Amino acid sequence: MEEIRKGSEAEKHKIANAAEDELSDLAELFKVFGDSTRIRILYDLYGGEKNVTEICEDLEMNQSAISHQLRLLKTAGLIRARREGKLMIYALADDHVKTILAMGKEHIEE
Amino acid sequence: MEEIRKGSEAEKHKIANAAEDELSDLAELFKVFGDSTRIRILYDLYGGEKNVTEICEDLEMNQSAISHQLRLLKTAGLIRARREGKLMIYALADDHVKTILAMGKEHIEE
DNA sequence: CGAACATATGATAATATATTCATATAATCA
DNA sequence: TGATTATATGAATATATTATCATATGTTCG
């Protein structure tokens, strides 16, 4: 059951190696959505851009925790940031993010 | 910055408590997609139903690890199972799952 | 320039998660 | 029924993740 020879049936059905990387990326993407704090941040930004302090207030969480999560969200390309004086203004990166959120929401409600 | 009074600006913008549970569920759902092994299982089932041994072979992972993840996927309602003799046959629960996978894939490729 | 405000970041501690190992349960078949 | 095959599950370990604390960086303003 463990052994798989080249050209075997198992080999033929095995997930193509080419796709493996892509599947990893996919898991990484969903992992970012898979945290309550990050989802709440995304949802908070759903209505429009906000600065860090506002997000902290909305979520009633401390600034450091929020900043750490904002960094993850930014790295994942789900949000974008710009500076405005001493404020950092965050916003959803694009409508794609909204679509994914809406999609998940729909699945839950079904 | 930490303190939020009732009726304050912060209070007004705070994410509605009603929505909090839903956001948690959403995070839980995405969390299930957010693991490489589970995504590979889902993708393996994308083409059609398979039994546990086949999934093990395709993913080249041991049976226990796969079973544990199958249980999580099933609990989350993403796959369904039926017994056929000594085999357990697993399949994607519905097209919704496919849609979510496709959606994420699209985001990555953008 | 120095104080005050806004945000970021590194280290740590607490918690969650995945895989493995050993074993249990379920079904078939000789 | 006993052996064999297929799958599930509990416990333990290894690893990853999150929040917190302390502090650093960047910006404005007096």
Image: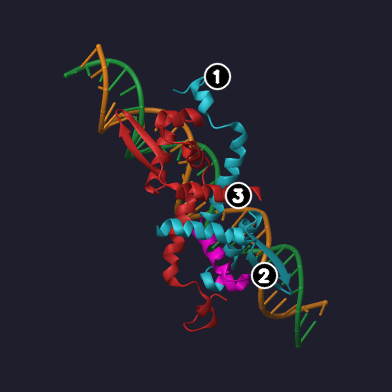
Chain colours: A red, B cyan, C green, D orange
Task: Return the residue at label 1.
Answer: B7
**What is the distance, in whole Å, between disc 1 and disc 2 at their CAs?**
55 Å
Q: Chain of mark 2?
A: B
In the foreground, A28 or D5: A28
Task: Return the residue at label 3.
Answer: A106
User: What's drawn in magenta, residue-wise?
Assistant: B35-56
- Which residue is drawn at the image coordinates 62% and 58% (left, top)? B78
- Which residue is drawn at the image coordinates 67% and 62% (left, top)? B80
**Residue C13: x, y in percent?**
46, 36
Dot 3 amino acid type? Glu
Q: Chain of mark 1?
A: B
Q: Residues within 10 Å of mark 1 (few under 14, many from 20)?
A: few
**Residue A47: x, y in percent?**
48, 36
In the foreground, B60 or C24: B60
Pointer 3 and pointer 2 on the same chain: no
Element on which disc 1 rests: loop
The quadrant of the rendering that contains the N terminus of chain A is: bottom right
**What is the distance, in whole Å, between disc 3 and disc 1 at their CAs?**
32 Å
Is B44 one of the magenta-colored residues?
yes
- Which residue is drawn at the image coordinates 53% and 24% (left, top)? B11
Dot 1 amino acid type? Gly
Q: Main secondary structure of the magenta part?
A: helix
**Residue A2: x, y in percent?**
54, 75
Mark 1 or mark 2, which is nearer to you?
Answer: 1
Task: Return the residue at label 2.
Answer: B89
